[in-house]
Image (cartoon, rainbow, N blue to C red):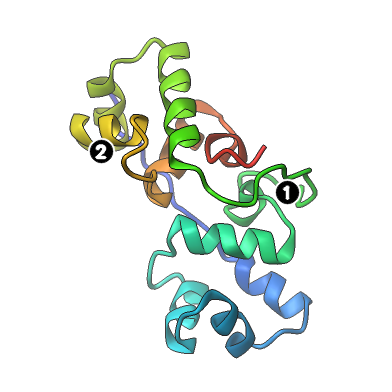
Amino acid sequence: MERYNYVLDYSRIKTLRQNFKINQKTIATYLNISIAAYSQFERMTTLITIEKLNELANYYNVSLDYLVNISDNPNIIIKNKELNKKLIGERLKNIRKEKHLYQDTLAKEIGTGHSLISEYESGKRLISLSYGYAICKKYNISMDYLYGKI
């Protein structure tokens, strides 16, 4: 069984900010974080959270798939702007079952433990960006679908 080895790239957050001619302070204020923290996200020296990435997707009205370079199409119809842990957990469980995987198998494939997959599926925890990205890349799934936005 091969563990995932995907490089998460959300550099488009900087490109979008520059294209919209917005400064980092404006975006940091919108996200309710410091300018230094936002700057680290843009430089990808600190991993952005799925919650903050979702806020940016909503701000720019683009898809999560576009922000993480899964798709080059920024234009999708987004039904849900908020992340719902229960819905996301149900989608993960359905994806896992469609792929005929046990929780242990999925956990090993993305480099985590069975208990975390269980917490994700039960809606107790929100799937982290890095694990969500790994699942989407490995199984060719839209992040917007996994995270319940479409």
The quadrant of the rendering that contains the N terminus is top left
Specify the label residue 128 is tagged with.
none
Residue drawn where x is 58% and y is 63% of the image: 55
Amino acid type of the residue tagged 1 in the rendering = Asp
Amino acid type of the residue tagged 2 in the rendering = Gly
Vertical comparison of 63 with 53: above or below: above
The quadrant of the rendering that contains the C terminus is top right
Residue 51 position in % (x across, y down): 48, 58
Image marks 2 and 1: residues in contact by CB distance under 8 Å: no
- Secondary structure at badge 2 equals loop
Vertical comparison of 44 with 121: above or below: below
Circle 1 residues within 10 Å: few <14, some 14–19, many ≥20: few
- Secondary structure at badge 1 equals loop
Which mark is first along the chain, 1 or 2?
1
Specify the label residue 72 is tagged with.
1
Vertical comparison of 7 with 85: above or below: below
Instruction: Name the side, left or right, on which 147 lies relative to 134.
Output: right
Residue 2 position in % (x across, y down): 30, 28
Where on the picture, by quarter, is residue 6? Answer: top left
Instruction: Name the side, left or right, on which 149 lies relative to 79.
Output: left
Residue 119 position in % (x across, y down): 27, 35
Where on the picture, by quarter, is residue 54? Answer: bottom right
Give the residue number, with chain letter if any, for mark 2.
111
Circle 2 residues within 10 Å: few <14, some 14–19, many ≥20: some
Instruction: Name the side, left or right, on which 82 lies relative to 88.
Output: right
Residue drawn where x is 59% and y is 78% of the image: 30
Residue drawn where x is 31% and y is 25% of the image: 106
Residue 32 position in % (x across, y down): 50, 79
Distance from Cα at disc 2 to Cα at disc 1: 27 Å
Number of numbered discs overlaid on the protein picture:
2
Q: Considering depth in this image, is 84 or 60 the residue closer to the camera?
A: 84
